[in-house]
Amino acid sequence: KQEVTQIPAALSVPEGENLVLNCSFTDSAIYNLQWFRQDPGKGLTSLLLIQSSQREQTSGRLNASLDKSSGRSTLYIAASQPGDSATYLCAVHQAAGNKLTFGGGTRVLVKP
Amino acid sequence: DGGITQSPKYLFRKEGQNVTLSCEQNLNHDAMYWYRQDPGQGLRLIYYSQIVNDFQKGDIAEGYSVSREKKESFPLTVTSAQKNPTAFYLCASSSIRTVNTEAFFGQGTRLTVV
């Protein structure tokens, strides 16, 4: 059974510092990995999708890496801003059963 | 406007009642999913469907039921057998079996037992 873990569960940084969020998964037979942002009481907004054959994906201040063989992905957010405060979730799209399995999320607070 | 629409946004259920949450998508996606989220936690899969008239149980299917009569629609019924239904429910859709498949989510339904 696929298990997805996100460490740390919560993170607080001063504005301007770079953020590093970690995601690990146990079964490397995946189609892709997706990072989401969730604001309190809201649905999920897709940030980045990394295909299983890719090592990295970038969008603006966001950069996500994928090491499928070791079951790890990292989301980097450069020069954090108070507006980046949210919960960040990673999810793997499994080849078996076509299921989308989520980690527990990392709650981020960027202090002005 | 393409996307996924969940309704209602807030729902209140009395003890012993069944309630149905709506999820509609116009993205022409084959796969649809229902997740439950409890405060401060990640998403847990309730049911998912890859094709019309077929669906599979997720990790926490007990007390829930679904149907997939149309490609665009995947309603979730929370039955009286679900002992702790108060939670935030999220619906998602995606294409299937491609490395580009990106999941999209609705805005969620918050269900409260009164």
Image: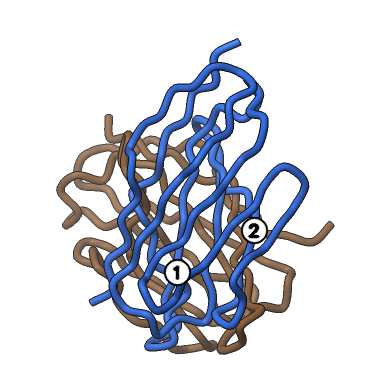
Chain colours: A blue, B brown
Q: Which image quadrant: the C terminus of chain B?
A: top left
Q: Few, some or many C-alpha atoms within 10 Å of disc 1 (few <14, some 14-19, many ≥20)?
A: many
Left or right: residue A77 compared with residue B67: right
Establish if B5 lies above or below A27: above
Callout 1: helix, strand or loop?
A: strand
Establish if B88 lies above or below B28: above
Q: Chain of mark 2?
A: A
Count of numbered labels shown in the rendering: 2
Please, which residue is most extreme toward the top here? Answer: A112
Which label number is shown at residue A21?
none
Q: Quadrant of residue A11?
A: top left
Q: In the depicted view, which residue is nearer to us: A12 or B24?
A: A12
Callout 2: helix, strand or loop?
A: strand
Residue B109 x, y percent position in the rendering: 48, 44
Left or right: residue B59 compared with residue A55: left
Q: Few, some or many C-alpha atoms within 10 Å of disc 2 (few <14, some 14-19, many ≥20)?
A: many
Please, which residue is most extreme toward the right here? Answer: B1
Residue A28 visible? The answer is yes
Q: Which image quadrant: the N terminus of chain B?
A: bottom right
Q: Amino acid at mark 1?
A: Val
Which label number is shown at residue A48?
2
Residue B23 x, y percent position in the rendering: 56, 60
**Image point 15% across, 48% down: which residue?**
B83
Which label number is shown at residue A92?
1
Q: Are marks 1 and 2 in contact (CB under 8 Å)?
A: no
Q: Amino acid at mark 2?
A: Leu
Residue B94 visible? The answer is no
Residue B108 x, y percent position in the rendering: 52, 46
